[in-house]
């Protein structure tokens, strides 16, 4: 199937029901969203966009973003989402790399949805490219992953069965729709299930908490940094739990057990995890009502296979996988074998119940004096300290040990974090070889557009002295 069929089916089944509401006060039904998407397709076609073209979409979350995204795909083009916080050189490089014919920003998106509807939609094959997603680039140069219509539709339907969403559900769209997580678990998932989405143009903890309650949100896909924020990392977050929230799906980065429990106490519901990557979105989800195991990212989504390679790397296969990297067969061959298995770059294990547990990113592994140190394990230990709101652990080159373990810490609001106290706390929970030898204290961690911590940026700051560190006194 194609996205066009998904849109048409949603309009036919739930036509008059509200599909999307946004901060501008728009409340478009499924039928109206389909009409606006056809209008955007017509306006794009009038600008020369057709089958096989690529359209960059650099806009904030809004009903108009949704219609512009769908309109580009209905016109036969592939959408190339670009984060609104991207620097101009990064935007230029990605537009050039993807060979985009047109760049759509907020202003143009509002024009497109008011155009004349495309009289007839072009015939689109299921294996045609619907979206080109750039990897986050937090550990190196970003690559462009091409995703087909059939992949998006098939996987969305499989995810819908896994999470059990329905037409009575309300989803908070605090994640940027320009990111794979937001696109799939907010916009496309709701299209496939009849759920209503409530969009935020940008995440703010206080506003998110207000919307969760006022809009009767039942399901919130989020990244851990959002959960840290609503738990009071940077602002006060007192108040009752949202009245209707059933569960939160955390993904995009490791979720420390301590933060998970704090978020559950603040939100009054279970916080569960899922696992995916740009090249193969959501391979596993720990969805209710299955028994939960805190720390696990769940069992494979329907249609997805997961296995652990001899070196511990997680490999996945299924309809959710990308077609390949755009114009880079060599890079594609490095991560996808002849049988269709994708090497994820993550180290993990499968337990006896088929649940996946992620140990860490292979590239983030710190080797200190010949000992392997997985940052996520150290982060989980430090995150349990009552003074810590957020923490990232990275390796710094060291002449003697090869690498030294450095913890970059954000203190909870109203608290003061201390290197000696954190060292003693960590020593009681993890092996001495894993305890950080240096600490840096910051107001906030550098984040990418998807909410992931930019560890490469932290390493660079440590290397050039922009991030001073403190050593424990003992």
Image: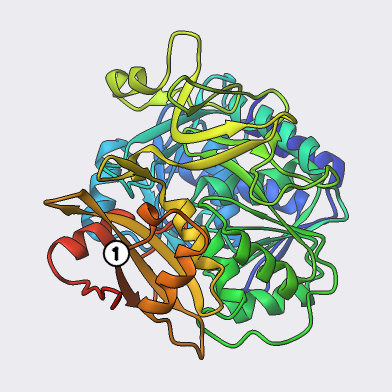
Q: Residue at x 12, y 65 (%)?
A: 464
Confirm whether residue 110 shows in the render.
Answer: no
Q: Position of residue 404 (x, y in %)?
A: 25, 55
Could you say which quadrant of the image residue 11 lies in?
A: top right
Q: Residue at x 73, y 53 (%)?
A: 32
Q: Residue at x 59, y 52 (%)?
A: 66
Front one among 108 and 185:
185
Q: Secondary structure at mark 1?
A: loop
Front one among 128 and 107:
128
Q: Position of residue 182 (x, y in %)?
A: 58, 51
Q: Residue at x 39, y 42 (%)?
A: 135
Q: Residue furthest front?
A: 474
Q: Which residue is mark 1?
A: 437
Q: Is residue 31 left or right of residue 252?
A: right
Q: Vertically, is 432 above or below 225? A: above
Q: Vertically, is 251 above or below 265? A: above
Q: Residue furthest top?
A: 338
Q: Position of residue 199 (x, y in %)?
A: 63, 64
* Label 1 Cα neighbours within 10 Å, binned few <14 / some 14-19 / many ≥20: some
Q: Is residue 398 left or right of residue 66?
A: left
Q: Vertically, is 25 above or below 174? A: below
Image quarter where the C terminus lies is: bottom left
Could you say which quadrant of the image residue 362 lies in?
A: top left
User: How many tags in the picture?
Assistant: 1
Image quarter where the N terminus lies is: top right
Q: Residue furthest bottom?
A: 414
Q: Is residue 42 left or right of residue 439?
A: right
Confirm whether residue 228 shows in the render.
Answer: yes
Front one among 222 and 463:
463
Q: Position of residue 360 (x, y in %)?
A: 46, 43
């Amino acid at each position: 199937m194609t996205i066009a069929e998904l849109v048409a089916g949603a309009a036919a089944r739930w036509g008059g029901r509200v599909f999307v509401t946004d901060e501008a006060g728009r409340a478009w039904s499924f039928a109206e969203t389909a009409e606006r998407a056809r209008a955007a397709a017509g306006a794009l076609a009038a600008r020369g966009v057709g089958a096989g073209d690529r359209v960059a979409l650099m806009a904030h979350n809004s009903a108009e973003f949704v219609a512009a995204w769908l309109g580009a795909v209905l016109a036969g083009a592939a959408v190339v989402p670009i984060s609104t916080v991207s620097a101009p050189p990064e935007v230029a490089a990605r537009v050039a790399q993807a060979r985009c014919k047109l760049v759509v920003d907020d202003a143009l998106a509002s024009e497109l949805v008011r155009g004349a509807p495309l009289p007839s939609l072009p015939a689109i094959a299921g294996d045609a490219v619907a979206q080109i997603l750039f990897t986050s680039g937090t550990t190196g140069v970003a690559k462009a992953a091409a995703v087909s219509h059939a992949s998006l539709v098939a996987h969305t339907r499989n995810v819908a069965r896994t999470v059990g969403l329905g037409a009575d559900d309300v989803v908070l769209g605090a994640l940027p729709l320009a990111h794979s997580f937001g696109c799939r678990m907010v916009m496309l998932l709701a299209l496939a299930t009849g759920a209503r989405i409530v969009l935020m143009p940008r995440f703010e903890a206080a506003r998110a908490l207000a919307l969760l309650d006022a809009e009767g949100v039942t399901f919130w896909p989020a990244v851990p940094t959002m959960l840290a924020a609503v738990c009071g990392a940077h602002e006060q977050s007192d108040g009752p739990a949202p009245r209707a929230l059933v569960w939160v799906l955390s993904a995009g980065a490791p979720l420390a057990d301590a933060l998970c429990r704090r978020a559950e106490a603040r939100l009054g519901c279970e916080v569960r995890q899922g696992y995916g990557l740009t090249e193969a979105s959501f391979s596993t989800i720990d969805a209710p009502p299955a028994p939960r195991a805190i720390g696990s990212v769940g069992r494979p989504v329907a249609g997805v296979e997961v296995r652990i390679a001899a070196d511990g790397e997680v490999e996945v296969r299924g309809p959710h996988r990308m077609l390949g990297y755009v114009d880079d067969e060599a890079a594609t061959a490095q991560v996808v074998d002849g049988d269709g298995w994708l090497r994820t770059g993550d180290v993990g294990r499968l337990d006896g119940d088929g649940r996946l547990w992620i140990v860490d990113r292979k590239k983030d592994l710190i080797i200190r004096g010949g000992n392997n140190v997985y940052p996520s394990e150290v982060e989980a230990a430090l995150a349990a300290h009552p003074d810590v709101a957020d923490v990232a652990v990275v390796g710094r080159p060291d002449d003697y040990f090869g690498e030294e373990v450095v913890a970059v810490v954000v203190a909870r609001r109203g608290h003061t974090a201390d290197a000696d106290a954190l060292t003693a706390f960590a020593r009681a929970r993890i092996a001495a070889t894993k305890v950080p030898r240096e600490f840096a204290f910051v107001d906030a961690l550098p984040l990418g557009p998807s909410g992931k911590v930019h560890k490469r940026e932290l390493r660079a700051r440590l290397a050039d002295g922009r991030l001073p560190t403190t050593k424990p006194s003992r």
